[in-house]
Image (tube, grey):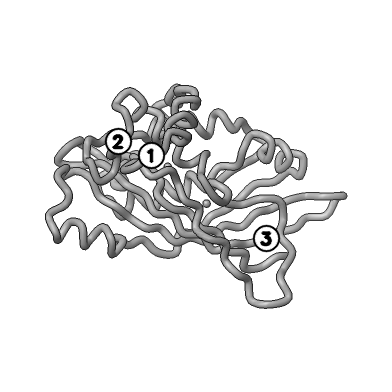
């Protein structure tokens, strides 16, 4: 700018987390990253009645928790495109250089969806179309429990140092437990992972309510399988 996949097997030793999925760096995007961003089709926003509403839109912690809960709650027998359209309906843009950097203005409307579907390493929060179909064949879906929301230290330091110019932009890291449910050969299985998603949000005073700008990092560590 890293996600539930087919059921994992419980490791015989303590699980080793994969490196955080690195999203394309908007401050210094490579030519390849810009080409990948440009290749992403513009996603039409979903129905307004599916958007986050109420108190969750008025506070960044509440919004971050609800956005991540909905983002990672995935029913693979429904349309992946519909899920992307919901992400786009929550999208907000910023001019903050520390967030969008050298991303061309005409590509910034693709950044929200791009950041949750494409990474330069590791799996993204939303599986690829092929993986989505494979999970659909397993009648898979996920449930999510939000464990913690906090402001990343790096973001707090940037604010304290006066490096943030857009008063409406902020950062949050959300920790959650994601449980994937599947059915294979008539047997139900579950697998849980501990995930962490760092994201940027845009809200007051720049815009009236909070919205999603981009995912920064995503990690998923297998915890249990049954």
Furthest residue in direction bottom, as rendered:
13
Q: Which mark is residue 29?
A: 1
Residue receiving disc 3: 191
Task: Decide if residue 11 is on the left or right side of residue 99.
Answer: right
Circle 2 packing at 10 Å, graded few (<14), some (14-19), many (20+), is: some
**Residue visible at 25% across and 46% down in the picture:** 98
For the residues bearing labels 1 and 2, Cβ distance under 8 angstroms: yes
Which type of secondary structure does the marked residue at label 2 adopt? loop
Query: Could you give the CA–CA distance between mark 1 and mark 3, rounded to whole angstroms?
Result: 35 Å
Which type of secondary structure does the marked residue at label 1 adopt? loop
Q: Is residue 46 above or below residue 51?
A: above
Of 105 and 140, the residue lying toward us? 105
Counting residues from the start of the chain, the first of labels 1 and 2 encountered is 1
Circle 3 packing at 10 Å, graded few (<14), some (14-19), many (20+), is: many
Q: Is residue 51 above or below residue 148?
A: above
Q: Is residue 87 visible?
A: no
Q: Is residue 8 above or below residue 106?
A: below
Furthest residue in direction right, as rendered:
185
Query: Could you give the CA–CA distance between mark 1 and mark 2, rounded to whole angstroms?
Result: 7 Å
């Amino acid at each position: 700018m890293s996600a539930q996949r087919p059921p994992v097997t419980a490791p015989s030793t303590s699980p080793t987390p994969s490196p955080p999925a690195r999203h394309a760096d908007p401050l210094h995007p490579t030519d390849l990253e810009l080409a990948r961003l440009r290749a992403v089709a513009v996603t039409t926003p979903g129905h307004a009645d599916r958007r986050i509403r109420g108190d969750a839109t008025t506070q960044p912690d509440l919004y971050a928790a609800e956005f991540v809960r909905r983002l990672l709650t995935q029913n693979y027998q429904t349309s992946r495109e519909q899920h992307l359209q919901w992400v786009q309906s929550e999208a907000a843009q910023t001019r903050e250089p520390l967030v969008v950097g050298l991303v061309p203005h005409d590509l910034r409307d693709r950044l929200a969806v791009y950041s949750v579907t494409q990474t330069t390493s590791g799996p993204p929060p939303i599986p690829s179309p092929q993986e989505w179909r494979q999970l659909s064949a397993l009648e898979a879906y996920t449930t999510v429990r939000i464990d913690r929301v906090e402001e990343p230290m790096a973001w707090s330091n940037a604010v304290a140092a006066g490096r943030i110019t857009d008063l409406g932009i902020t950062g949050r890291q959300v920790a959650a437990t994601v449980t994937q449910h599947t059915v294979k050969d008539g047997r139900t299985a579950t697998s849980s992972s501990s995930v962490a998603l760092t994201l940027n949000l845009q809200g007051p005073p720049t815009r009236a309510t909070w919205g999603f700008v981009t995912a920064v990092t995503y990690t998923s560590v297998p915890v249990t399988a049954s």
